[in-house]
């Protein structure tokens, strides 16, 4: 199987049989055999391809797609699948690293297919050749180096791809007794010249999938596809068992779970009166106002109420709570029993032993303290407009993607949460968030609102660019522009003895707005400075948005709403 086109086609064929339906690519010559393998499949409707000029943005787009597909799989009961990510050799591979790291620590399944030169060129100084490219991406669940030439066989490629998909989905392998966490896998493939298929090879490949022209690239799933055991809500019967033991002083601490649901924990909290200390992107925050045990501003409660914090004996942890130092301190307390449950808890049978015998007083004390803390936070909040706009968005029936730093923290004080909130909390970086939100919209096939600060927005200006032939997704970006990294002003870096270094080295004012950037990248733009003006503009924007589910046939509005936070707040903002 020495022909590069044959190897690429077998990789594509194996991915399709394993259930992969989304492929993100960036242009490159060494990866051309993969382009010629995947493009006809996209034309036949077997898969959906997405092209981005920048590998860094391509990686984050794939990250958002993976999250959106996981949510849809959970809602519909379909099997989940990873997103394939194709790049050429050399530094292009390194540009995938930020997205791959977030996928690893956010437990999202990606398969990075990195095209490489033949092994004989390694160590020779050959152009765009990294000597050990199969090890460029750290923190992957597995890595494979597929050789060029006669050393690779059809069965070998098929087996390698099947294992790569299984590893990305967290399947138990190598004799392990239990599954591992889902995450990224690197499939490094050496391609020798020629890199372009012959006319006959391309025609035969196209004919193989011509009958699949009516396939749905998002909804269709193969019966052979590995799964990370996603199940529809309430249908975990027959799944693996998770045991938790309640004691006096039990709380639930919840963070981002990569799009997984947690209905079984929500029911447990209500039935057993367990205080829920959930970060904004936890599924337990959704419709928090309808919960009798959700504790708003819980980090403030942990700090200001030692009588409550000190009475905690057991913590049930779901997802990845990383947002606040008080929660980190609680989880590090060796006197507290910490029980971590799987992200996909609703795919498990939850068995509960023990109980709290206080008639619900424990939860009521926490909720009352939380409600009081919300008022205190509002009184102290210097960015009144930002907080008000954030809470306004939280109360809408929307899908909201929240950036790291201050934006996600403003959401922590929201009580009326009707938005479905997502965030990249694996490593909580501020890079690639425009691309991730776009991928989320494409994966969910619905509009997404991205709430982001100005520094994070500048980090991913390239994410505003969608090639003319590509689906754009339906994204409204709300930029909270306070001219710099204001979060540092609230940290220890503002202490008097180091304050002289704060502005230049931490907050880094830039003096830029986003109107001209929006025009350059083809986005609508509006600038507001009050909640009243924002509400009107946002309502108009949402009324004009259309679903992103038309697979290239839809027409969407893409708008940047810039909130100017550099002006003093008015009475309307408070």
Image: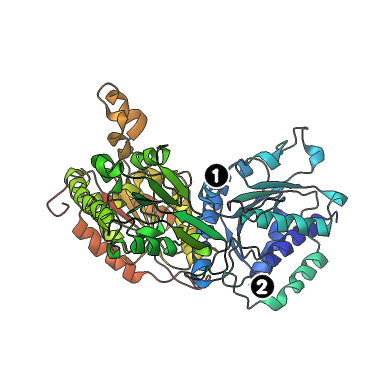
Res. 559 in view: no
Furthest toward the right, the residue is: 150
Q: Locate the N terminus by quadrant.
A: bottom right
| Residue at x-position 42% and y-position 38% | 332
* 376 relative position to 297: left or right: left
- Numbered circles on residues, count: 2
The reply, left or right, for residue 254 in relation to residue 32 is left
Which residues fall within the magenta stretch?
178-182
Which of 552/169 is in front?
169
Q: Are marks 2 and 1 in contact (CB under 8 Å)?
A: no
Q: Position of residue 475 (x, y in %)?
A: 41, 61
Label 1 neighbour load within 10 Å: few <14, some 14-19, many 20+: some
**Is the residue 229 above or below the residue 457 in the image?**
below
Which SS class for mark 2? loop
Q: Main secondary structure of the magenta part?
A: loop
Q: Calculate the distance from the C-alpha at mark 2 to the C-alpha at mark 1.
A: 33 Å
The residue that label 1 is drawn on is 101
In the figure, 369 relative to 539: above or below?
Answer: above
Callout 2 crowding tier (Cα within 10 Å): few <14, some 14–19, many ≥20: many
Label ID, residue 368: none
- Where residue 550 sits in the image (x, y, percent)? 50, 73
Which residue reaches farthest left? 571
- 148 or 230: which is nearer to us? 230
Q: Which residue is mark 2?
A: 44
Circle 1 SS class = helix
Which residue sits at x=63%, y=44%? 93
Q: From the top left corner, tell me how far across and down residue 412 is, in percent.
A: 30, 50
């Amino acid at each position: 199987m020495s022909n590069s086109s044959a190897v690429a086609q077998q990789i594509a064929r194996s991915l399709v049989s394993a259930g992969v339906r989304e492929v993100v690519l960036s242009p490159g010559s060494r990866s051309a055999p993969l382009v010629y393998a995947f493009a006809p499949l996209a034309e036949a409707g077997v898969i959906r391809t997405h092209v981005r000029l920048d590998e860094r943005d391509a990686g984050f787009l794939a990250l958002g797609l993976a999250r959106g597909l996981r949510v849809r799989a959970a809602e519909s009961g379909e099997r989940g699948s990873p997103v394939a990510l194709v790049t050429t050799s050399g530094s292009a591979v390194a540009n995938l690293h930020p997205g791959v790291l977030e996928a690893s620590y956010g437990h999202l399944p990606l398969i990075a297919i990195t095209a490489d030169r033949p092994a004989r060129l390694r160590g020779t100084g050959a152009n765009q050749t990294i000597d050990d490219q199969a090890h460029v991406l750290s923190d992957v669940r597995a890595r494979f180096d597929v050789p060029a030439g006669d050393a690779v066989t059809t069965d070998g490629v098929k087996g390698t791809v099947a294992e790569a998909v299984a590893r990305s989905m967290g399947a138990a392998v190598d004799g392990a007794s239990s599954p591992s966490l889902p995450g990224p896998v690197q499939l490094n493939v050496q391609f020798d010249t020629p890199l372009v298929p012959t006319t006959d090879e391309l025609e035969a490949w196209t004919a193989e999938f011509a009958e699949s022209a009516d396939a749905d690239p998002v909804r269709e799933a193969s019966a052979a596809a590995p799964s990370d055991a996603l199940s529809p809500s309430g249908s975990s019967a027959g799944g693996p068992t998770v045991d938790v033991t309640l004691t006096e002083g039990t709380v639930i601490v919840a963070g981002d779970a990569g799009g997984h649901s947690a209905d079984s924990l929500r029911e447990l909290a209500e039935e057993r009166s367990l205080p829920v200390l959930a970060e904004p992107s936890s599924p337990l925050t959704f419709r928090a106002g309808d919960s009798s045990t959700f504790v708003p501003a819980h980090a403030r409660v942990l700090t200001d109420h030692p009588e409550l914090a000190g009475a905690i004996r057991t913590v049930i942890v779901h997802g990845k709570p990383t947002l606040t130092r008080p929660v980190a301190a609680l989880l590090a307390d060796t006197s507290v029993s910490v029980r971590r449950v799987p992200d996909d808890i609703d795919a498990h049978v939850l068995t509960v032993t023990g109980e709290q015998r206080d008639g619900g007083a424990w939860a009521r004390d926490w909720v009352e303290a939380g409600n009081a803390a919300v008022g205190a936070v509002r009184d102290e909040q210097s960015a009144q407009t930002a907080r008000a706009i954030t809470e306004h968005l939280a109360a809408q029936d929307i899908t909201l993607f929240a950036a790291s730093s201050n934006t996600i923290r403003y959401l922590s004080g929201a009580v009326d949460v009707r938005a479905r909130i997502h965030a990249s909390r694996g490593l909580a970086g501020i890079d690639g968030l425009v691309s991730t939100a776009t991928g989320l919209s494409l994966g969910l096939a619905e509009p997404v609102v991205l709430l982001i600060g100005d520094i994070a927005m500048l980090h991913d200006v390239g994410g505003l660019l969608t090639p003319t032939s590509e689906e754009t997704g339906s994204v409204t970006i709300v930029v909270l522009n306070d001219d710099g990294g204001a979060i540092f002003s609230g940290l220890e870096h503002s202490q008097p003895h180091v304050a002289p270094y704060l502005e230049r080295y931490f907050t880094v004012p830039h003096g830029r707005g986003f109107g001209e950037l929006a025009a350059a990248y083809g986005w609508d733009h509006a600038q507001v400075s009050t909640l009243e003006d924002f509400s009107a503009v946002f309502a108009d924007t949402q009324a004009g948005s259309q679903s992103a589910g038309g697979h290239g046939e839809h027409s969407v509005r893409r708008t940047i709403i810039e909130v100017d936070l550099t002006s003093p707040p008015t009475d309307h903002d408070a």
